[in-house]
Amino acid sequence: MLITNLSGLWGMSLQRWMKTQQKHNKKLVKLLLKNSTTLPSAVPGVSTRRKVLPLLATSMLTGRQSATASQPAGQWLKFNHPLTVLESGRSGGGMDYWLYLPQRADMARLPLVVMLHGCAQTAPQFAQSTGMNRLADKEGFAVLYPQQIARNHAGRCWRWYNPEVREGEAETAAIASIINQVAERYALDRSRIYIAGISAGAAMANIVALTHPQLIAAVGMHSGVAFGAAQTPMEGYALMQQGAEQDMHQAVRAAASKMGQLPLMPAVLIHGREDSIVHPVNLAHLAEQFRELHHLAGYARENMTLKITEKQATRRSGRSYKNCEYYFGRKRLLQVCEISELGHAWSGGDASVNFSDGCGPNASRMMWEFFRRHHRAAEALTSHPAPDVSEVERIQAGLV
């Protein structure tokens, strides 16, 4: 009964949204509103029939879905990670993931960038969309692409709104296990492991970073939402459209209270000003959460300096954008980039792939240029003890 009611509410919200969308989007959304639905065959690997609450999925099922990743000259390897009960909630099954190793003589101690796709995407599609593998060849790092399991969500959405996921179980635990296994198998540099994603993948990347801060040196979020501001699919949809309504600091403080040590979590945040799927207000809310996280790690807000750069549109660099960089001393811990005229798509990507915009600036290069300045081993040495639960509760109650 609850699922039926949620589906009805979801349907009404989507019907209002659909009036502003293109005609070809409407047909796909209506398919997903049926009680029993089959995802369009253009989504590779998804053929199951089941009831769907399509968070970050219905609005993303648009245009071409059939592209496969064209790979550079390095190694493109596919694996399957057998899931534990903690990682899947049930016995059996596995999570597919792809690993790109660049073409270079010295493979030892490579940095690793973990890339999490959005809804209605596969990992190979996301690799093609972002062009991260070609950048890896030039800069010398490995790239890991976990792929959401269709039985977890028929639209392959990472369930960032799920309390278990946010607490570090289910998909979060699976991704962390895969990262650790790959890092050990290929002797990667554990001080330089970074994670990034788009949309649902961005929210998921943030969860992995905040639940495994000793593993992740920095996080990149393209078109993401605030951490911990939704508990259900319906709340998630409202968050996407309106941003966080409650105090954005509470979820970060609660997460920080569970860490034995609270290392800094550098972040680069990118969002399109014309994004009608994840409203740009979410960018401001995310930025405030990371400023609070850095404050809890021992960096006083009054010591923060801000550098603002505005770039005009050019044929070479692409669209105009505003870049805000937050420094604590000489450390650039937060970069916030707003891109003009960009919708819900990876900036500077492969325009032949869904949710990818061919016009710059290049989000992949922007993220790597930010990541490469951060090393987890060095940051961990300066980490501060996390505030205990009682202190967090007093802060939330306004007593301190």
Image (spheres, rainbow, N blue to C red):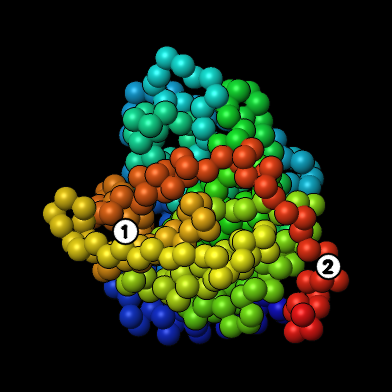
Q: Tell me the element at label 2.
A: helix
Q: Tell me the element at label 1.
A: loop
Residue type, label 2: Val
Q: Residue furthest left?
A: 315
Q: Residue at x 34, y 41 (%)?
A: 131
Q: Residue at x 24, y 62 (%)?
A: 311
Is 233 positioned to the left or the right of 224 in the image? right
Residue 55, can we see it? Answer: no
Q: Compared to 147, does 389 lie above or below?
A: below
Q: CA distance from mark 2 to mark 1?
A: 47 Å
Q: Residue at x 46, y 40 (%)?
A: 372
Q: Residue at x 82, y 71 (%)?
A: 391
Q: Residue furthest right?
A: 390
Residue type, label 1: Gly
Which residue lies under the disc numbered 2? Answer: 389
Q: What is the crowding at mark 1: few (fewer than 14 residues within 10 Å), some, or many (at least 20)? A: some
Which quadrant would the C terminus be assigned to in this image?
bottom right
Q: Compared to 324, does 44 lie above or below?
A: above
Is 215 positioned to the left or the right of 348 in the image? right
**Residue 98 versus residue 333: which sits nearer the camera?**
333
Task: Point out residue 272 in the picture as x, y percentages from the top left corner.
Answer: 35, 66
Which residue lies under the disc numbered 1? Answer: 63
The image quarter containing residue 49 is: bottom right
Q: What is the crowding at mark 2: few (fewer than 14 residues within 10 Å), some, or many (at least 20)? A: some
Q: Which mark is residue 99?
A: none
Task: Point out residue 68 in the picture as x, y percentages from the top left corner.
Answer: 36, 39
The image quarter containing residue 83 is: top right
Tell which circle, 2 or 1, labels the residue nearer the N-terminal end. Answer: 1
Asked if labels 1 and 2 touch by Cβ distance under 8 angstroms, the answer is no
**Residue 39 versus residue 203: which sits nearer the camera?**
203
Q: Compared to 128, does 266 lie above or below?
A: below
